[in-house]
Image: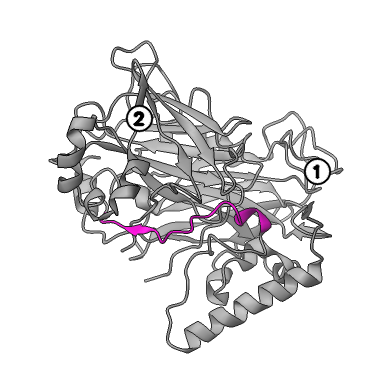
Amino acid sequence: MPLSTQNEINREIAAISAEARATVEAGGTPELHPRRGYAPYRSSVLRHPTHALVKADPEEIERTSPAFGHTDVDSYEADLTIQHPGEPLGERIIVTGRVLDGEGRPVRNQLLEVWQANASGRYVHKRDQHPAPLDPNFTGVGRVITGDDGSYRLVTIKPGAYPWKNHTNAWRPAHIHFSLFGTAFTQRLVTQMYFPGDPLFALDPIYQSIVDPAAQQRLVSQYDHDVSVPEWAIGYRWNITLTGPKQTWMEQDDDHE
Amino acid sequence: MSEQTPSQTVGPFFGYALPFERGGEVVDRAQPGAIRLHGRVFDGEGIGIPDALLELWQPDGSGVISRELGSHERDGYTFTGFGRTETTRAGDYTFTTVTPGAVGGGAAYALVTLFARGLLHHLFTRVYFLTPDEVPAAVAGDAVLSKLPPERVPTLLAVADGAGSYRFDIRLQGENETVFLDFDA
């Protein structure tokens, strides 16, 4: 099948967004997550369930999560710019924020993993064939354990946008992939953090698969001048919320620590 | 009170970031009682998915949920209950683990979480370990199995396919589509 044009993708996105907006205006609940079946993202077509998910009360294994602590990660893994002998190319940035549950309580001592393209938009992955240079001083993988207040702080390079083959002239907005564990496995989250004001948002079916505009904004970091370090790096702030099932189990979980 | 941060796909390029050495070996394969849990992840056309990531989270053989640190480092002895592995070019995955014990009075199962390119939000499912004799009572007594249409129950059952080996295929769509769970109810 020939690739669609960007205009064809835009029309599909607009039609779904209009339908979603009408549903909310008619009193429907805004959707918090992307739709698993979202045809403008072509790879989703054969990879989403067609049955409704079966609602289930989480049992104890699902209300717990693997235990992590500060001995699981080396402190230097939070700095993606010091993993090689030389300095990576690109714009040095700081990304910081807090991981909180739906009640605003810190998600502490949990593992946060990140991975990203380099400043040219190229991943250190053998299947990434984008003809942009690899950077011998940048791998683009980091890990951090959240602090007692749920905070994390990463030092990295601002990733570049990159092309992909969803449709003709398709480009992903610059993003950093995040993987998070909450205190319950039901809070497990893999997502992508974006940068403010990216002109590619409107054109990107992965970003647009989140049909609620307010929910989309929750993936966009904010420039924070208080995070920027003079003469050294630009700062972005991004907070993450992991709601879960009803959270009465948390006190019980604390007993194990 | 703040709202949930939305999911996004794991994408195609997680392979150099998320898998870790021996991540699929929840226990050492030389450990007495070690089993192989393996299968294939299929898309809607019955093709194996070569860029999926699976996570296993389970109690130990006696039903105890581990609180041990070190889930991403394999010392060959510590049981943390967590495993992570990516699929092969054919869409196959393998974990080495133990048959989970039942937590409380319910049927014994492990939680399986699936991520993949094309999957915008991960999927949860459960793999139950039941002998054919145990199935009727387990289905009647389990809060999830008991409410499924009978023809969908087998999609959650590991199938013994050799000594210490169990097969659990995952079908994202189509005939025998796997039952996936929503815990946000």
Stretch in magenta: A42-57
Q: Residue under label 1, please give it.
A: A89
The label nearer to you, 2 versus 1, is 2
SS category of the residue bearing label 2:
strand
Q: Amino acid at mark 2?
A: Val
Residue A114 x, y percent position in the rendering: 58, 45
Question: As displayed, is residue B56 above or below residue B151?
Answer: above
Q: Residue at x 60, y 56 (%)?
A: A44
Q: Is residue B93 left or right of residue B14?
A: left
Q: Quadrant of the C terminus of chain B?
A: bottom left
Front residue of this view, candidates B32 and B75: B32
Mark 2 neighbour class, 10 Å CA radius: few under 14, some 14 to 19, many 20 or more: many
- The numbered disc on residue B159 is 2
Which secondary structure type mostly characterizes the magenta part of the structure? loop
Residue B19 image-quadrant placement:
top right
Mark 1 neighbour class, 10 Å CA radius: few under 14, some 14 to 19, many 20 or more: some
Query: Is A6 in the magenta?
Result: no
Q: Quadrant of the N terminus of chain B?
A: bottom left
Q: Amino acid at mark 1?
A: Leu
Front residue of this view, candidates B155 and B85: B155
Q: CA distance from mark 2 to mark 1?
A: 51 Å
Specify the color scheme.
Answer: one colour
Residue A240 x, y percent position in the rendering: 48, 59
Co-location on one chain, circles 2 and 1: no
Residue B24 x, y percent position in the rendering: 46, 27
- What chain does badge 1 belong to? A
